[in-house]
Image: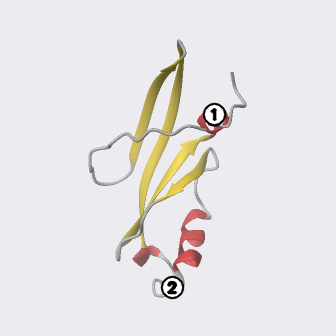
Amino acid sequence: MSHIAIPIPPLPGKQEIEVEVTINGQKHQLHYRVELFYWNDCSNPHGHRADCISEMLSSHDPAWTVYYIGAPTDEFVPITFVKEESRRLLRGEVA
């Protein structure tokens, strides 16, 4: 799969992102969501960060799949989700 980078303005909170792309004359809609997960929201904020991410993701909406885990800071980790139908399109399962 090819990749392109699209800068997104730094806005607070959850960001719902819809991208319409035209590839070889065919239009497609892609749906992403970026959320900041704060370490202090974990039951053990000083524990292993992988366990903390797993805990925070355990109750996420199943219509969204983790697409990318960004670089963590001392306060939070940004996580990008992709909507299920967009994920299938990205994997080439939908024409």
Q: What separation in Å lies between label 2 and label 1 (alpha carbons)?
A: 34 Å
Q: Residues within 10 Å of mark 1 (few under 14, many from 20)?
A: some
Residue at x 35%, y 77% (from the top left corner): 74
Question: Given the current orientation, which residue lies at the most extreme front position?
Answer: 2
Q: Is residue 54 left or right of residue 14?
A: right
Looking at the image, what colour scheme do you see? secondary structure
Say which of 45 and 29 sits in front: 29
Give the numbered dot on residue 44: 2
85 vs 27: above or below? below
Q: Name the residue carrying label 1.
A: 85
| Image quadrant assignment for residue 16 | top left
Q: Going 55% across and 15% down the picture, which residue do you hit?
A: 24
Which image quarter is the N terminus in?
Answer: top right
Element carrying mark 1? helix
Which is nearer the eye, 36 or 23? 23
Identified at 32% across, 43% down, the residue is 8
Nearer the observer: mark 2 or 1; the answer is: 1
Label pair 2/1, CB-CB below 8 angstroms? no
Question: Where in the figure is residue 65, as x and y percent of width and height?
Answer: 61, 49
Other-residue count near label 2 (Cα within 10 Å), few / some / many at <14 / 14–19 / ≥20: few
- In which quadrant of the rendered image does the C terminus lie? top right
Residue at x-position 54% and y-position 67%: 56
Identify the mark at residue 43; answer none if there is no mark.
none
Residue furthest toward the right? Answer: 93
Residue 37 locus on image (x, y percent): 43, 65
Which amino acid type corresponds to the residue marked 1 in the rendered image? Glu
Labels 2 and 1: the sequence-earlier one: 2
Q: Looking at the picture, how far across and down is residue 5, in whole percent? A: 40, 41
